[in-house]
Every structure is written in C-alpha cells, then in structure tokens.
C-alpha cells in the first residue's frame, strides 16, 4: 500500500469552492504548508497564498482538496470564484491518480470522473467528526436565518425543532439558551427522555399531524415531513426553515400554495461561518491523512 506520512506532504492544491476554501487555504498555510489555489480567477489577491490555474495547482501539489460540493450537476468542478466552466482533463486525472485527493460526496465525484476509482480519493464530508463539528455552525446559522425572517425575537417565541440528530440537539440547546419555548420531535424513546431532561417539550415525530401555535419551525429530517397534508394543517403565520440536505423535508410548492413562508437553508456553515467551516475541513483532512498514512 502507498505510504506517506503527513510530514511528506509539503504542499496542497485547493481546487475551486467558496469562502470556506479560502479560509481552508489560509489555515493550511498558517500550518506552514505551501498552498496553491486553482479556479479562483475572479480574485485579485489572497495575501501569501498562490493564485494559479487548476492545472498548475494539481501538478505542483502533493495533495489536492476539492470543494463542498466538489462537482456540479454537469460534472464540472464547483468553482464559484471563476467565470470558467472547469472540467478535469485526462492529464489532470492522471496526475490525481498519483497523489491523495480529498473530496466531498465521493460517489458523485467518481461518477463524474470514474477513472479516479483507481486512485486514493477520500471523502471528508462522510467523516463523523466532520458532521459533528459542522453541526454547531449549522445550528447557529439556522438561528441567524430565523432572525432574518422572523419579525419577533427568538426570546419568548414558540419554536418546533423536527428531528433530534446532531443538528437538532445543538439547535434545540441554542434556542433554549435564547429563552425560546422549544418543542422537539424524535422517534427514539431515549431521545424523548433527553429532550425532556433538557427542559424542552418532547413529541414523537410520528404524532406530528398538525403544526399549530408555533412561530418558527426548523426541520432537520432529510425526508418529506412537511408534505401537502401536514402543510394544510400548519398555521399560515408560521415560518418553516428547512435545514435538511436535498431533497429536503418540505414541499415548497405546496407551501407557496398555502401562503406559508418556507425557507430552504442549505450550506449554512459556508454562508454564515466560512472561517469555521474552512477550519473544520482542514481538521478533517489532516485527520484522514494521519489515519491512513501513519
């Protein structure tokens, strides 16, 4: 098996992405590694970081990190800071086969570039520590989203959090700390007990047949919870914020038909806390390197 310790990696190529990748690059650079940014043509300067083209960033780096998400629906690399549509060519793919590559949503990435199945492609997005660390900026971003859309204060508001996973736990805790009246739904008896122990009102998710009396509803469940039937029994003044990954848990077309204010809030860490989000990617990538190449 290929052997490489983190000390053998002297440079990272960071290809595409949003502000998260810029903070990721700075954090890696601050750890005394060379960083080459490819796919950031719109930027004039990034301080000590090297701005270059995608090809050079791939060729001249020891390891390559792709953004979150790594590829778009048309199989191009996600490069919002570039006016160009970037596809990997055969020479670049051959270079990537020679070094560790870090991506998000690995299966989608490999469907776009199947030849890389023979390479060392690691999915930082799939790591448990990434999901746990990412939950906090997501929860804080959800509160920020609520403040932007709700004309009242969080304090004293009636909130419903649907789902008690990583994000649901932290979000309920944050809302409670802001003095909101918080109800949380869950399926497991142990979660129901924990919800009650934290001072929130528990509810079984299966018993969610109507949404009445809530100012704010936060859905964290990645399945269709707020379908037409439930939305028919939802107060028109309730604001629904869907935090679930696509396809989400809210029928937005039905919500519009019922004049219910529903907000799709995706990639909140990248929008609300890009510095923290970039540092989380760095920690996860470095953990993978240490695990695999120690």
Image (cartoon, rainbow, N blue to C red):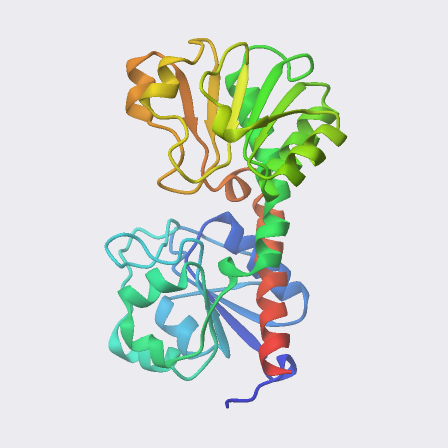
Q: Is residue 186 above or below residue 75?
A: above
- Which residue appears at 64% of the width and 17% of the height? 154
Image quadrant holding the C terminus, namely bottom right
Looking at the image, residue 61 sits to the left or right of residue 159; the answer is left
- Which residue appears at 54% of the width and 35% of the height? 163
Of residue 274 and residue 115, the one placed in the foreground of this image is 115
- Which residue appears at 39% of the width and 58% of the height? 70
Q: Is residue 26 above or below residue 236?
A: below
Looking at the image, residue 146 sits to the left or right of residue 173; the answer is left
Of residue 270 and residue 162, the one placed in the foreground of this image is 162
Q: Is residue 105 above or below residue 272?
A: below
Residue 212: x and y in percent read 50, 11
What is the quadrant of residue 194 in the picture? Answer: top right
Residue 249: x and y in percent read 40, 33
What is the quadrant of residue 77 in the picture? Answer: bottom left
Marks counted in the figure total: 0
| Furthest residue toward front | 189
- Which residue appears at 68% of the width and 12% of the height? 156
Residue 1: x and y in percent read 50, 90
Residue 275: x and y in percent read 61, 48
């Amino acid at each position: 098996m290929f052997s490489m310790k983190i000390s053998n990696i002297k440079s990272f190529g960071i290809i595409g992405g949003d502000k998260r990748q810029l903070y990721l690059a700075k954090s890696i650079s601050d750890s005394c590694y060379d960083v080459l940014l490819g796919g950031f043509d719109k930027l004039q300067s990034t301080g000590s970081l090297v701005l270059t083209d995608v090809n050079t960033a791939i060729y001249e780096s020891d390891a390559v990190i792709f953004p979150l998400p790594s590829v778009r629906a048309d199989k191009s690399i996600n490069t919002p800071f570039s006016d160009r549509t970037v596809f990997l060519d055969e020479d670049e793919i051959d270079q990537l086969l020679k070094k560790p590559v870090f991506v998000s949503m690995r299966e989608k990435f490999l469907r776009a570039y199947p030849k890389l199945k023979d390479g060392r492609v690691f999915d930082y997005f799939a790591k448990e520590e990434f999901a746990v660390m990412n939950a906090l900026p997501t929860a804080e971003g959800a509160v920020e989203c609520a403040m932007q859309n709700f004309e009242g204060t969080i304090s004293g508001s009636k909130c419903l959090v649907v789902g008690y996973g990583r994000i649901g736990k932290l979000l309920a805790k944050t809302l409670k700390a802001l003095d909101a009246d918080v109800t949380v739904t869950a399926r497991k008896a142990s979660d129901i007990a924990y919800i009650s122990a934290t001072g929130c009102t528990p509810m079984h998710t299966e018993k969610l047949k109507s949404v009445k009396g809530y100012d704010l509803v936060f859905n964290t469940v990645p399945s269709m919870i707020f379908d037409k039937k439930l939305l028919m029994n939802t107060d028109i003044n309730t604001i629904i914020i869907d935090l679930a990954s696509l396809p989400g848990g809210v029928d937005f077309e039905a919500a519009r038909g019922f004049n219910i204010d529903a907000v799709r809030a995706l990639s909140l860490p990248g929008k609300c806390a890009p510095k923290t989000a970039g540092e989380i990617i760095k920690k996860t990538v470095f953990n993978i390197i240490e695990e695999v190449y120690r």
